[in-house]
Image: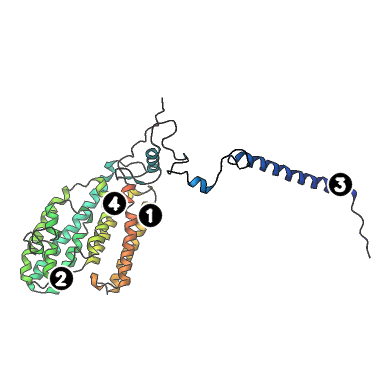
Amino acid sequence: MAISSPRPRSALRFRRPRRWLLATAAVAVALIAVLLGSALAPRGLFGGGHGSFGVRDLAGRIESADALGTRLRHVYDSSVSAKVYGSQISQVEDQGFNASGAMTSDLAPLPASEFRAPVAQYLRYAAGWLARAGRQVGTLTAILRSGNRAAAQARWKVAWSDYLHLGAVYGLFGNLDQEIDGNPGGLPGGAASPQFSGFHRLELGLWSGRPLGSLEHWSSLLARDIRRLQRVLPRTRIDPLDYATRAHEILEDAQRDLMSGVDVPWSGQGPLGTAAGIAATDEVIKTLVPLLSGRDNTLAEVQDELLLVAQAYDRVRREHDGAWPSLSQLSMSQRELLDGSLTGALNALQLVPGTLGTVPIPVIPSIPRRR
C-alpha cells in the first residue's frame, strides 16, 4: 500500500495568501456597495431625513406627464422647439412625409430635365397602342353590322384592352378622355344620357342585349374620338412628379375601379383591364430604369413585384383555357391570388415617387443661440 507524501511546504505557503486576498477583496466590494447605495438612495431611506420614496407616494404627486421634468421642451440653449426640430431631423433620416403631406426622401433630388427622355419614350409606346385600338374599333364597327354578338364582344375586349395600355396618359385629355373611356356615373341621366359614349356605352349595349345595329353609331363616334386623340397625344406634356406618381396610380385605379367591377358593371372584365394596366405600369418602370438605378432598392423591389403580379394574372388566364375570365367567373382562391399579388405590387410601386423626387428637402435651419 503506497503512502502519499505530505505536500511540499511551498504549496501551503502559496494557498494561504491567495485565500486571504479573495476575502479581503470581497469585504472591500461590499463596503463600496454600501457606501454607493447610501449616497444614491433617496433621502430618508437610511434614516437621514424625513422624506419617503415609493410608487404609491410618487403616484399621488404626479399631475402631468412632465411632472418629473424629463421632457425636453426646447433644443438646449435655443428657442427652437425640440418637437419641431426632432420631426425635421427624422424626415431627413427616414423617408416619409413632411408637415405639408409631401413625400420626402434622403436622396439627392433629380433635375426635372431627366424625365424628358422617359416621357418621350412612353408617349411613343402609347401612340402605338392607340393606333392598334383605333384599328380594332374599326373592325368592331364592321362586326356590329354583321349581327354577330359573340364576335362583337370579343372584339370589344381587344379594343378596350389596347386602349388601357396607354395607362400613364389618363386624365390628360379633358372631355376627350371621358368621351372615349368614361363612365355614366357623373352624367345627368346616367347611362341614359346622350353624353354617355365610348367603350362603356358599347359595353352596356353588347352585354345587355341591345340590338347590335343601334350600337354602330356609338362605335363610329368612338373611332372618330380615337383619331382626334391620335392628333393630340404627341403634344402631350407630363410633369415629372405626375409621371413618377402614375407608376403607382395606374394599378391603384385598376384595383379600385376594375377589380371591384365599378368601371365594368356589364362585362365584368376587371382582370382583362387590370392585365393591361400591369403592362402599362411595366412600361413606365422600363422608361425610368436609368433614373431609378442606384437609388435605394426601389427598382429591384418594383421589378420583382411586377413579375409576381404578371405571373399571377397569367396563371389565372391559363386556368380559364387562355381566355380572360370575368370577375364573376373567378374562384375564391383565384380572387385571393390576384388581390394579394396586386397589393404586393402597389406596396412596392408607392416607393417610386419618393425615390424620384425633383424637389430638394428644405434645409434644416441652424439652431440660433440664446442671447
For disc 2, the marked residue is: 153
For disc 4, the marked residue is: 287
Q: Residue 13: which numbered mark, if any?
A: 3
The quadrant of the image that shows the C terminus is top left
For disc 1, the marked residue is: 300
**Rendered position, 212 above or below 362:** below
Residue 24: quadrant of the picture: top right
Pointer 2 local density, CA inside 10 Å: few below 14, some 14–19, many at least 20: many
Residue 33: quadrant of the picture: top right
**Cα distance in 3D space between marks 3 and 4:** 86 Å
The quadrant of the image that shows the N terminus is bottom right
Residues marked 2 and 3 touching at CB (< 8 Å): no
On the rendered structure, is 295 left or right of 53?
Answer: left
> Residue flagged by tag 3: what amino acid is it?
Arg
Going from the N terminus, do you reach mark 2 or mark 4 first?
2
**Rendered position, 12 above or below 316:** above
Going from the N terminus, do you reach mark 3 or mark 1 first?
3
On the rendered structure, is 11 left or right of 311?
Answer: right
Pointer 3 local density, CA inside 10 Å: few below 14, some 14–19, many at least 20: few
| Nearer the observer, 116 or 277 | 277
Going from the N terminus, do you reach mark 3 or mark 4 first?
3
> Residue flagged by tag 2: what amino acid is it?
Gln
Disc 3 vs disc 1: which is toward the camera? 3
Residues marked 1 and 4 touching at CB (< 8 Å): no
Q: Is mark 1 on a helix, strand or loop?
A: helix
| Nearer the observer, 20 or 186 | 20
**Cα distance in 3D space between marks 3 and 1:** 72 Å
